[in-house]
Image (cartoon, rainbow, N blue to C red):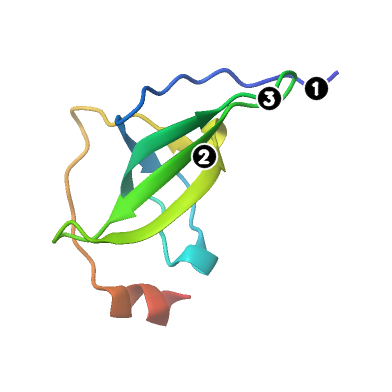
Amino acid sequence: MNEVIKLDFTLYQDVILTRDLPEEELRAGDVGTVVERHDVPGRETGYSVEFFDMLGHTVAVVTLPASVLRSPTRADRPTARSQAETVLAG
């Protein structure tokens, strides 16, 4: 039997990506904001998450399962990387 993962994030909550999404030029550790919740009975909850650059411009809006997101903790520290680093790493 498939177990449904239950992780709850609230609308406009900051979340942290836990895996790379090279097709979106996003990397694990990138911080985004939940902009929509998607509930499908019997399936893992999904979220539309908007990711921004340091100037507040949207770089991606992606729909993701809750299992690839986590809430920030006091141990997390902001970091910066350029888009060129993402392209070169991919």
Residue flagged by tag 3: what amino acid is it?
Answer: Val
- Location of residue 8 in the rendering, given as x and y in whole percent from the top left corner: 46, 19
Q: At 17% from the left edge and 43% from the top edge, which residue is drawn?
A: 77
- How many other residues sit within 10 Å of disc 1, few (<14), some (14-19) or many (≥20)? few
Q: Is residue 14 left or right of residue 41?
A: left
Q: State the image quarter where residue 79 is shown.
A: bottom left
* Nearest the eye: 35 or 72: 35
Q: At 39% from the left edge and 82% from the top edge, which residue is drawn?
A: 88
Residue flagged by tag 1: what amino acid is it?
Answer: Asn
Marks 3/2: CA–CA distance: 17 Å
Marks 3 and 1: which is nearer the front? 3
Q: Is residue 47 left or right of residue 34?
A: right
Relative to 89, does residue 2 appear above or below in the rendering? Answer: above
Q: Which residue is mark 2?
A: 68
Residue flagged by tag 2: what amino acid is it?
Answer: Val
Secondary-structure class at tag 3: loop
Q: State the image quarter where residue 35 is shown.
A: top left
Marks 2/1: CA–CA distance: 17 Å
Q: Outermost residue, left direction?
A: 55
First in sequence: mark 3 vs mark 2? 3
Marks 3 and 2: which is nearer the front? 3
Q: Which residue is mark 1?
A: 2
Q: At 47% from the left edge and 41% from the top edge, which residue is drawn?
A: 48
- Location of residue 37 in the rendering, given as x and y in whole percent from the top left corner: 49, 29
Q: Which residue is mark 3?
A: 40
Q: At 74% from the left edge and 19% from the top edge, which residue is drawn?
A: 3
User: Is any atom of residue 48 visible in this view?
Assistant: yes
First in sequence: mark 2 vs mark 1? 1
- Location of residue 34 in the rendering, given as x and y in whole percent from the top left corner: 37, 35
Count up the numbered dots.
Answer: 3
- How many other residues sit within 10 Å of disc 3, few (<14), some (14-19) or many (≥20)? few
